[in-house]
Amino acid sequence: MAAVLVGQFHARDAEGRVYSVHEFENLEATGDQLVTTYKLAIGDRVKKNDDNNFELVQSGVILVREPSPIVAV
């Protein structure tokens, strides 16, 4: 089964560069458990360390998730 885009957010590295991270869900090979994966918009793989910290798999650069904007109503 193909991965489905379920979210996207921005994250920054220590030097302040902003990365667009996409969150995907797909069924595991057994077909009974959802697996969440992360990739940059340009396709680089991202590993989730905890809720707000991520790591670029290829380079090891640590990314910190930007807080979601609060919209006043």
Image (cartoon, rainbow, N blue to C red):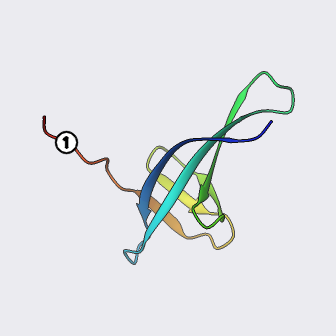
Tally of numbered discs: 1
Dot 1 lies on which element?
loop
Label 1 sits on residue: 71
Give the residue type that dot 1 points to: Val
Q: Is residue 33 above or below residue 17?
A: above
Q: Which residue is at the front of the view, 70 or 55? A: 70
Q: Tell me where residue 47 sits by quadrant.
A: bottom right
Q: Nearer the viewer, residue 12 or 9?
A: 9
State the residue lying farthest toward the left: 73
Quadrant where the N terminus sits is top right
Relative image position of residue 34 (x, y in whole percent): 69, 29
Residue at point 48%, 54% (across, down): 53
- Image point (79%, 32%), residue name: 28
Q: Nearer the viewer, residue 41 or 59?
A: 41
Q: Would residue 63 appear left or right of 55 to someone viewing this image?
A: left
Farthest residue toward the right? 30
Q: Is residue 37 left or right of residue 2?
A: left
At horizontal 71% and vertical 36% (from top left) the residue drawn is: 26
